[in-house]
Image: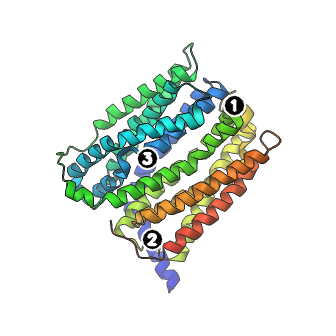
Amino acid sequence: MKFGVSLQKLKQTISPAVMRDYFALISGSLGRLVVSLIYFIALANSLSLADFGLFATASAAGVVLSRLVALGFNSPLYRIATVKPHLLGTYTAGYLLSILASIPLFALATIGAYLIFFKDNVSFWPFAIIVIAEALVWRSAEIIIIVNNGLGRFGRGSFLTIAGTAARSAAAFLFAFTSAKDISHWAWWYLGANVFSLLLALQFYPKVRLRLRPKLYMRRIADSLSVTAAEFLFYLQNEFDKLLVLSFGGPTIAGIYAIIMRLVDLTAVPIRSFNMMLVQKLMRKPDLLASAKIKLGMEGGIFIVSTIALGGLAAVLYIFPNALGSNVAPVAGLVPLVLLVPSLRNLIEYQNELLYARGQSGLRAINLSVTALIKALLIWLLLRSSHDGNDWIAWLNACFVVLYLVSACFTYWHLKKPANRV
């Protein structure tokens, strides 16, 4: 009987309507995957390995710092777009106000990140331009995509996702034909591509009437701030390893590591589309994953898809080592050493999305802070104990096993608690 009930719930979870929306959403993700690969190949073979490592690390810093922008008010905006779209104009006004309020904190954090991690390797302005392009310009375009997805306009979201990546790919392709191929010049090309993406995205924002209603925002402050903390810690957990590698290994080692993790990150594209659909379902039906069989099925599917994706890529690079360009070829042989990293990393992200969807943003923040600290400690130990160049890379699998176990125990223990309606 229990198995029949679980199967029925699983069928409801993956109903034809859900699958139709998922394929509309993933079409953008798969398009972005292809275009991202073109962008990666063009840029990795234009910049030197050291400059690519510096850019990837500065971009990662921008992604982390972008989570301070708007102080998490993107969460109420997304929730409203999903469940109460008639209030979208009111919450759009609140979001714009929260951006202005967050600028001083964002500026201080940007300067602090530069002084701690980058001042010995790159001048301030190229770093600042990359961070601004990532955290203010592209993040704003990304919010427009998120709002469209919340409204169920997945086709528009997919188009804008592909267009944004295509703009960066076009910039990288044109940059390859310039004479000054260094990070200082590429930073301006990157900013221009992201500005174009934002201007295009603005054409697809729903026509709304902006109205400030501070009383409505007050009850969302706790959720917004917890989301800020959770997202900041989540991306810090994902990207802090790049900062550590730059600090301890230098730009060239950071470049090698950035190439490997970029390939790993490509496997997360279809998983994140699935996560977004599941989050929307859980917002409406918090007990959708009450069955242990459904939980195991979801995790098993993510594990298998992620592992096959990287395994397939490793096989292609083994047969055709120059498939991604001559600059990437020396790193291609290291890809099989991180075979388990994509699946474990994607599962940690999935578990945190479960907590967010059920309104448990505070618990999500705690989970992310714990895993971020553990990851930083493990990466630091691996780098310190490494004696032979890249011998520590294979140990990243063990590192992510530890992180997965910590996250899984925390997440599923707290999923037993009632969901919070936000």
Q: Residue at x 69, y 33 (%)?
A: 250
Element class at badge 1? helix
* x and y percentages locating residue 17 in the rendered image: 37, 61
Q: In terms of secondary structure, where does tag 3 sit?
A: loop
- Of badges 2 and 3, nearer the viewer stands 3
- At label 1, the amino acid type is Thr
- Near-viewer residue (197 or 71): 71
Disc 1/disc 3 C-alpha distance (Å): 28 Å
Image mark for residue 67: 3
User: Which type of secondary structure does the marked residue at label 2 adopt?
Assistant: helix
Between marks 2 and 1 in the image, the one whose residue lies nearer the viewer: 1
State the residue in front, 171 or 409.
Answer: 409
Question: Which mark, residue 252?
Answer: 1
- The disc, 2 or 3, on the residue closer to the chain's N-terminal end is 2
Residue that lies at the very extreme toward the top in this rendered image: 179
Residue 15 coordinates in the image, percent (x, y): 41, 66
Whether residue 323 is visible: no
Q: Amino acid at mark 3?
A: Arg
The image quadrant that residue 78 belongs to is bottom left
Left or right position of 82 against 407: left
> Decide: marks 1, 3 in contact (CB < 8 A)?
no
Q: Which residue is mark 2?
A: 11
Quarter of the rendering containing residue 244 = top right
Decide which of tag 1 and tag 3 comes sooner along the chain: 3
Q: Position of residue 146 (x, y in %)?
A: 36, 48
Residue visible at 47% across and 30% down in the picture: 128
Image label count: 3
Q: Cα distance, mark 2 to mark 3?
A: 35 Å
